[in-house]
Amino acid sequence: MLAPSQSQLQEFNRRRSLIEYTLCNDEDIWAEMEKEASEALQGQGAKKPSLVVLTSSQLETRLNTFLIDTFQNNWSYNQEQLNLAKQNLKPEMISPSSINWDQRRQGANPSLSGQYTLNPETQNLDFERAKVFIPNPKTLKQFEGKPLADLAQYLQTTYSNKYYIPGIEYWQYISQNLDKAPPALKDSKNYYFYFGSILRSRRGDWCVPRSRWGDVAFVRDAYWLGDVWGSVYRVVLLER
C-alpha cells in the first residue's frame, strides 16, 4: 500500500469535520471513518499527522473564548453588550457559496449581536503547513468603492475551486500563534480579510473579520458587508 499524501490526509480530516458539523451521531459512520483513517495510515512508513481533529464542541468552546476576548479586550464591549453577545455565540456552519451576501448586508439586528458563521471546509485544517495566497490587489481594484458583499461573491466564484476561504478559525490561529503567522500578514500598512466567516457586531450587522499587524501583535477588527473595499485591503486565502 502506498503511503498517503498530505492532501489525502487533509481530505480525510475535512470529510470527518463535515460529518460532525452536520450533527451526525451515527456510531457506524464514525466507526467506518476511523477504519478508513487507520487503513490510510498503514502505508510505507506512514506516520499519523500532528494535526489534532477537534470535535464540534471543542471547536466552539475555543472560538467562543477567542471571540469573548475580542469583544471585551479589543472592541471594548461594556458588560451589557458582552452578556448579549455571549448568549448568541453559536456558530452557523455554512459554506460561503451558500450565503446570500446582499441579504446579509441588509440584515442588521442588534439583539443578535455575537452570531457568527464558519466555513465547514476550513475547520481542522493544518494551518501551520497551510500556504497563504493573497490575490493581487490590482485584480481586486475593480471592487474599490463597492460593498464588501460584492467582493465576497466574486471570491467564491473565482477562487474557491483552487483555494480555501478561511474565516474566524484562521483569524484566531494567527492571533494566538504570532510566531507561526505567515510573514506576509505582518504588514502594518494593509488590512487582511477572512471572508470564510462573518459575525454580527454590537450593532447587529454582519461583518467580515480582518487583521492588521501592530508591530507586536495583530489588531483584530471587522468590517460591515455594506462598507466599501479600499486600496489598502487584502484577502487571505489558503492553497488547497
Image: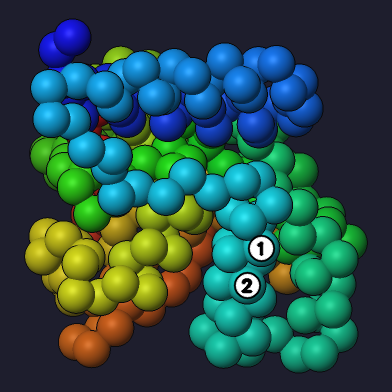
Position of 158 relative to 199 (above/below)? above
CB atoms of marks 1 and 2 within 8 Å: yes
What is the three-letter code of the residue carrying label 2?
Thr
**Residue beneath label 1, please?**
61
49 sits to left or right of 167: left
Closest to the observer, 38 or 127: 38
Q: CA distance from mark 1 to mark 2?
A: 6 Å
Q: Residues within 10 Å of mark 1 (few under 14, many from 20)?
A: some
239 sits to left or right of 174: left
Q: Determine the residue positioned at 19% across, 20% down.
A: 43
Describe the element under mark 1 as helix, strand or loop. Answer: helix
**Residue beneath label 2, please?**
65
What is the three-letter code of the residue carrying label 1?
Thr
Q: Determine the residue positioned at 36% across, 17% down.
A: 39
Position of 32 relative to 41 (above/below)? above
81 sits to left or right of 104: right
